[in-house]
C-alpha cells in the first residue's frame, strides 16, 4: 500500500540514534510497508540489513556532494512496490496514528498530498519499540515537552505514484524544496490535506553542525539561493497555510477556508488588539473561551459537511 523513502547522514553518534529510531518506526506501520534508503553513507548498508530495508546506494550528487532531490523522487516512483509513496526526512518518527490518517485520507479520495506539522522533540536515546506503550510515551513527551513547528516546515509528503513526474534538481540539506513540493501539488491541482490535528509526527531535534553557519546557513548560502532560484525565484513556494483540506481530530477530511488570510501577520495583530480591547464587553455578554470553542466546533462540523 505504501512505500516510504529517504536518505540519511552517516549512522554515527546522535544522528545514528535518531535515524535508526525513525526508520524502525516506519517498518512498524504495517506489515506490507516498504522502506527504501538511498545513499552509501557509513552504516547505511548495515542498518538496511538489520531493519529489512531496501538499500539503494547509488544516488546522483551535486559537485558539492549534496544529493539531488529529483533523482530520489524519480527513482522511488520507478522502483517503489506500492501505488502510494511517502518521502520523509530520516529524523521523523511516524506512529500508528499516521497510518490511520493515511487510510482515512485514502478512503476520502485517491489523489492527494498528505502533510502535517511536526513536533520538535528532544530524543537522545534509542527508542524501546517493545509493546505498544512506546507510542504513548513518545506522543506524551512530544505534546508535553516538545514544540509544534510552524506552518513553514514540511518534513514528509504522502502522494500517489506519478504526482511528481518532474522535479527540479533541488539539493537536499538546503531550504525551499519542501515548499516547492506543496506548490507542485496545488498547481496540478491535487488537494493538499493537513493532518496536523489528527496525528503526531515527531521530529527528533538535532544540531546543524554540518554547516559552518548552522541552520541559518542552510537557508541563506549560495546553494540555498540556488534552490530558491529553481523554485521560480521564490514564486513557486507554498506551505501548510495553503492546504486546501484538513484531517480533523474526528478523522474527517474537510475543506478549509481563509486559512492563509487568518494567518497573515497583519490580521493576527488586528485580532489580538480586538480581543484585548473588547474584554469587558465580552465579559458582560458571557462570551468566554468555552462559548467561543462551541461556536468554532459548530463551524468545523459545518465545514466538514461541505467537504
Image (cartoon, rainbow, N blue to C red):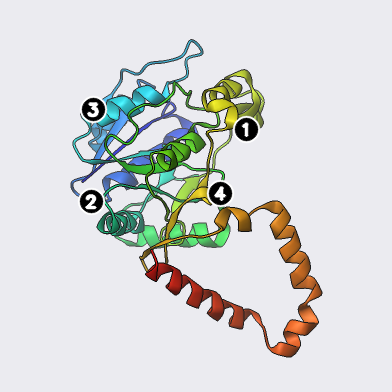
Q: Position of residue 14 (x, y in %)?
A: 49, 36
Q: In this view of the protein, which residue sits in the foreground, 8 or 259?
A: 259
CB contact under 8 Å: marks 4 and 1: no
Q: Are marks 3 and 1 in contact (CB under 8 Å)?
A: no
* Distance (Cα) linking label 1 and label 2: 34 Å
Crowding around mark 1 (Cα neighbors within 10 Å: few <14, some 14 to 19, many 20+) is some
Q: Secondary structure at mark 1?
A: helix
Q: Which residue is mark 4?
A: 151
Task: Evaluate whether residue 219 shows in this view.
Answer: yes
Whichever of labels 4 and 1 marks the residue nearer the N terminus, that label is: 4
Q: Nearer the viewer, mark 4 or mark 1?
A: 4
Upstream in sequence: badge 1 or badge 2: 2
Specify whether 262 is left or right of 69: right
Q: Which residue corresponds to mark 1?
A: 215
Q: Circle 3 is placed at which residue position?
A: 78
Q: Earlier in the sequence, mark 3 or mark 1?
A: 3
For mark 4, does the 10 Å Cα neighbourhood hold few (<14), some (14 to 19), or many (20 or more) residues? some
Residue at which label 2 appears: 30
Local SS, label 4: loop
Q: Residue at x 30, y 47 (%)?
A: 111
In this view, 258 is above or below 222:
below
Tag in front: 3 or 1: 3
Give the quarter of the figure containing the C terminus. bottom left
Near-viewer residue (80 or 33): 80
Amino acid at each position: 500500500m505504501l512505500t516510504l523513502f529517504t536518505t540519511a547522514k552517516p549512522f554515527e553518534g546522535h544522528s545514528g540514534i535518531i535515524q535508526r529510531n525513525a526508520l524502525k518506526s516506519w517498518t512498524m506501520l504495517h506489515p506490507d510497508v516498504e522502506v527504501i534508503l538511498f545513499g552509501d553513507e557509513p552504516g547505511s548498508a548495515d542498518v538496511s540489513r538489520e531493519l529489512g530495508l531496501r538499500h539503494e546506494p547509488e544516488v546522483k550528487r551535486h559537485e558539492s556532494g549534496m544529493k539531488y532531490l529529483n533523482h530520489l523522487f524519480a527513482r522511488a516512483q520507478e522502483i517503489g512496490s506500492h501505488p502510494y509513496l511517502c518521502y520523509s526526512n530520516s529524523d521523523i518518527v511516524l506512529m500508528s496514528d499516521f497510518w490511520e490518517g493515511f487510510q482515512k485520507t485514502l478512503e476520502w479520495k485517491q489523489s492527494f498530498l498528505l502533510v502535517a506539522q511536526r513536533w520538535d522533540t528532544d530524543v537522545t536515546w534509542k527508542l524501546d519499540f517493545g509493546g505498544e506503550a512506546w507510542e504513548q510515551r513518545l506522543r506524551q513527551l512530544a505534546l508535553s515537552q516538545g514544540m509544534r513547528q510552524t506552518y513553514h516546515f514540511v518534513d514528509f509528503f504522502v502522494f500517489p505514484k506519478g504526482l511528481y513526474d518532474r522535479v527540479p534538481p533541488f539539493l537536499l540539506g538546503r531550504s525551499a524544496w519542501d515548499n516547492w513540493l506543496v506548490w507542485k501539488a496545488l498547481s496540478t491541482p491535487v488537494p493538499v490535506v493537513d493532518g496536523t490535528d489528527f496525528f503526531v509526527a515527531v521530529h527528533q531535534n538535532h544540531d546543524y553542525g554540518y554547516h559552518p553557519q548552522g541552520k541559518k546557513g542552510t537557508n541563506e548560502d549560495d546553494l540555498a539561493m540556488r534552490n530558491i532560484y529553481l523554485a521560480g525565484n521564490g514564486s513557486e513556494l507554498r506551505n501548510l497555510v495553503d492546504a486546501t483540506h484538513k484531517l480533523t481530530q474526528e478523522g474527517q477530511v474537510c475543506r478549509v477556508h481563509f486559512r492563509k488570510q487568518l494567518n497573515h501577520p497583519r490580521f493576527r495583530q488586528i485580532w489580538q488588539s480586538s480581543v484585548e480591547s473588547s474584554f469587558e464587553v465580552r465579559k458582560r455578554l458571557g462570551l468566554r473561551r468555552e462559548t467561543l470553542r462551541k461556536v468554532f466546533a459548530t463551524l468545523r462540523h459545518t465545514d466538514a459537511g461541505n467537504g
